[in-house]
Amino acid sequence: MGTKKLELRPVSEMSTSKDSDTNYTAANVKAPRMAGLLLRCFTWMMESDIFGLIFRLKLKKDNLITKVFQQTEYHEPPMFQPHFPIEVEESGVIQLEQNRSPPDHVARALECLYPLPSRNAIGDRNRHPFLHWKIRDYAEAFVSGRITPYLVAERFLSAVEDSCNRSPNMCFFIAYNEEDILRQASESTARHAKGKPLSVLDGVPIAVKDEIDCFPYLTTGGTKWMQKVRKVKDDAACIKRLRACGALLVGKTNMHELGQGTTGINPHYGAVRNPYDKDRCAGGSSGGSAAAVAAGLCPAALGVDGGGSVRMPAALCGVVGLKGTYGRVSSAGVLPLNWTLGSVGILAASVEDTLIMYTAIQGHLAQDWIASFPPAANLPILKDFEDGDLSKSKIISSIKIAKYSKWFDDSDKSVRTTCYSALNVLQQEYGVKVLEVTIPELEEMRLAHFITIGSEISASIGIDYDRMGIHDSGADIRVCFALYGSFSTRELLSAQRMRFRQMHYHMEIFKTADLIVTPTTAATAPVCSADGLKYGELNYVYGAKLMQYQIAGNFLGLPAISVPIGYDENGLPVGLQLIGRPWSEATLLHLASAIELLMAPNCTKPPEVVYDLLI
């Protein structure tokens, strides 16, 4: 007899209501933590013809991949990339004209903000134990002549050098070019001296994840070999837009190798340390960008989010992290690690700066390989309530939030308690309505995303990896590629059929709710274990906790944002995540700004490692 056939009910028979008969299944990863010599031995076995076959089959069977994607029958067709309706209705917004320049767009974003208050740097520092400077603070300081972009660039270089000389090395950057940084700063200083800055971003330091082309830097993807097979000849589309605004691009930030991990431990360029605790990880894979912002080296940075890689380190480092709807920001010039999951994202010290950066880089290109071309972007009008008068914003009180409590509650106690506190304050101050829902097959979605991201990176760079990269890669990455190469056609197609099912469930929820709320991560920043520093670390169990709430944003291409809301008992940051309807970035930013304002008194703890470039 053959294997017993399993069958999923058609999506038309499934319910997302609170009374659904669907059972919640928590992630049950069956893979031991490995590092050091044990990991090296396991790598050798995974790559061997005989032992590798045995281990790969066992891992897939033990972790339900075989059952769900080989032995289960689906009724739905595959969905090979996210696509959704074009229509989106949002209140309290202004709409960008798509044919305008990035500086023009940024100027429109400034119209959405309250006037920058008169700030005395030392006085503000005396009133507030910790305060990140915003993009507009830099711009005001440049315009007033109190400081120049050139002096800020010099202070940045000194701060990065100091961060590298600490014990341990903070490892924020893979590369930064002093000559190029000072050249950009000199040109910006000259523009300000003439009273002709290109935009509010002119001269403001912005860091770039080393997955995004930024000439003249190499794009390594956190590897030691990628630059040998892929040359950088031009800026990525998002970098061109930032340059048009005059942004001071200060280098390529460290990342988990090829984006295939959640810690930010990179055996080639060092483990990115968390500014709130040097013994903790910054998270992956955009950990360098998140940590650089948290440490005050720049008010904002770019990352790429293929599996929570912007939102996760944002939460662990206590900053804001936004990924837009799939296709909202062009991926031209981004390392092609995954075609249907990844999006350029923003890490910033505030929601305001996130809005400015989003406005600058948003926009697709005609040649982008996307199924749903984005409508004109909306920008939230934030000035109505950022002055502290909460009663003014009827827009916030009209937002309906969906919450799947069994999923929401499947997090560490300190994370859960902090997130509920933020949600309760939001309800009390604005009367926001929270709707209880059910999201079926969340564990199956996690596995489908894993199959998809592994298959896509294997197909995209696998030939170069086998030819040039395998022996120069960390042991954890070698294990990943050994497993990725074992995914079958049936498993990949079944994963895309699961994408169809999940899109249906989420669109059903969005018929009655504007967004879904979760913790950003189910746990706070993990310890940087010494035994994982040299060869990397495999810890799929903790990785699943960090990715638990991230998957829909990537697998379904939905916009999502993480907002810092406080700390756990160890003083480590906790983030709250909002997942929106397609193209609803303005609604996310609107509510995120309200949460930021409400939770500001709980977010005043300074990082252990922090720099001030304006004083």
Image: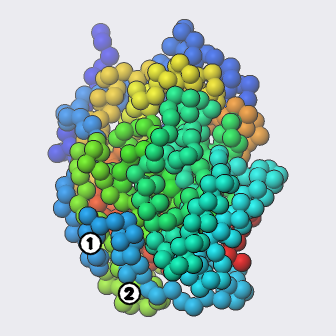
- Are the two marked residues, 2 and 1, in contact with CB atoms closer than 8 angstroms? no
Amino acid of disc 2: Asp
Closest to the observer, 31 or 87: 87
SS for dot 2: loop
Alpha carbon separation for disc pair 2 and 1: 17 Å
Quadrant in which the N terminus appears: top left
Amino acid of disc 1: Gln
Task: Answer with mark 2 or mark 1, whichever residue precedes in sequence.
Answer: 1
Residue 74 shown left or right of residue 551 in the figure = left
Up the image or down, 308 lies above or below 378; here it is: above
Q: Residue at x 25, y 48 (%)?
A: 366
Q: Dot 1 corresponds to which residue?
A: 95
Closest to the observer, 449 or 196: 196
Q: Which mark is residue 384?
A: 2
Q: Residue at x 45, y 66 (%)?
A: 245
Q: Residue at x 36, y 90 (%)?
A: 392
Can you give x and y, in whole percent of width and height, for residue 253 in the image?
A: 60, 50
